[in-house]
Image: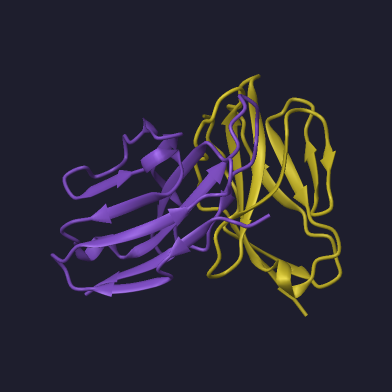
Chain colours: A purple, B yellow
């Protein structure tokens, strides 16, 4: 089966600019996650969707980050305006939620550099 | 979800079985132990998970102690491609709960 697709693979922007990342989860996966991974650290959850509703966005910096999942399929994560500390890899993951323990599948991520 | 503790780094000779430990002394009865690994420049990859019985799949074996306070991941016959950061995660069952990653163990397989 096709995996989680993310684009772009790399992005370099100046601080105060805006940027958007796109994620296409595995077909049929109801749960979608966005993680931020700063160099040398484990991934940190930013937001979790169940279909097109938000389950958890407690760690999303809402003053500058936003995310949406239209029609419960693709998702976009936006940063506006970007700060230097936003430099990180942004990972999208999806899982097949059936009320059981199912594993999450991750994309390759988008590496963002803010200069 | 319960917190996990892992050594920051380990080495393993190629062809040998690596033994990656994880401490989760505060684990509760409805929490599973998950293992993921992350090869450089890739997203995390699921390896295995278990509740209280030992588990084995094509990637690794998971040994969970009887009191469930610790576990060991054993990828057999390590190859250079198994060099990665290995994450041990404890997660509650019965929900689409998030995976909370710690710092993991950097496993380096040496030729």
Q: Where residue A108 sits in the image (x, y, percent)?
A: 52, 63
- Residue B65 against residue B41 in the figure, above or below: above
The residue at 79%/27% (across/down) is B66
Q: Where residue A83 sits in the image (x, y, percent)?
A: 19, 62
Q: Looking at the image, which residue sits at the far top?
A: B29
Q: Looking at the image, which residue sits at the far left?
A: A16
The residue at 51%/46% (across/down) is B101
| Image quarter (top left, top right, bottom left or bottom right) of the C terminus of chain A | bottom left
Q: Where residue A99 sits in the image (x, y, percent)?
A: 61, 24
Front residue (pair A99, B49): A99
The residue at 79%/54% (across/down) is B59
Q: Looking at the image, which residue sits at the far bottom?
A: B111
Task: Say how many tags the image has.
Answer: 0
| Image quarter (top left, top right, bottom left or bottom right) of the N terminus of chain A | bottom right
**Image position of A10 (left or right of B36):** left
Q: Looking at the image, which residue sits at the far front?
A: A71
- Residue A89 against residue B89 in the figure, above or below: below
Q: Where residue B22 sits in the image (x, y, percent)?
A: 66, 44
The residue at 55%/53% (across/down) is A106
> Residue B80: which quarter of the image?
bottom right
- Residue A65 against residue B83 in the figure, above or below: above
């Amino acid at each position: 089966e096709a995996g989680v697709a993310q684009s772009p693979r790399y992005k370099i922007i100046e601080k105060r600019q805006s940027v958007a990342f796109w994620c296409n989860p595995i077909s049929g996966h109801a749960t979608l996650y966005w993680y931020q991974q700063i160099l040398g650290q484990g991934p940190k959850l930013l937001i979790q969707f169940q279909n097109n509703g938000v389950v958890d966005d407690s760690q999303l910096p809402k003053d500058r980050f936003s995310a949406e999942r239209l029609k419960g399929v693709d998702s976009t994560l936006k940063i506006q305006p970007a700060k230097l500390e936003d430099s990180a890899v942004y990972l999208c993951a999806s899982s097949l939620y059936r009320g059981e323990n199912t594993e999450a599948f991750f994309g390759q991520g988008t590496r963002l550099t803010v200069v | 979800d319960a917190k996990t503790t892992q050594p920051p780094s380990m080495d393993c000779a190629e062809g040998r079985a690596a033994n990656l430990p994880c401490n989760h002394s505060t684990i509760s009865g409805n929490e599973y132990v998950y293992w993921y690994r992350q090869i450089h420049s890739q997203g995390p990859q699921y390896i295995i998970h278990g509740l209280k019985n030992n588990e084995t799949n094509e990637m690794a074996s998971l040994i969970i102690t009887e009191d469930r306070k610790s576990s060991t991941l054993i990828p057999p016959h390590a190859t250079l491609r198994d060099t990665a950061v290995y994450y041990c995660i404890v997660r509650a069952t019965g929900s689409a709960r998030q995976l909370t990653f710690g710092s993991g163990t950097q496993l380096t397989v040496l030729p």
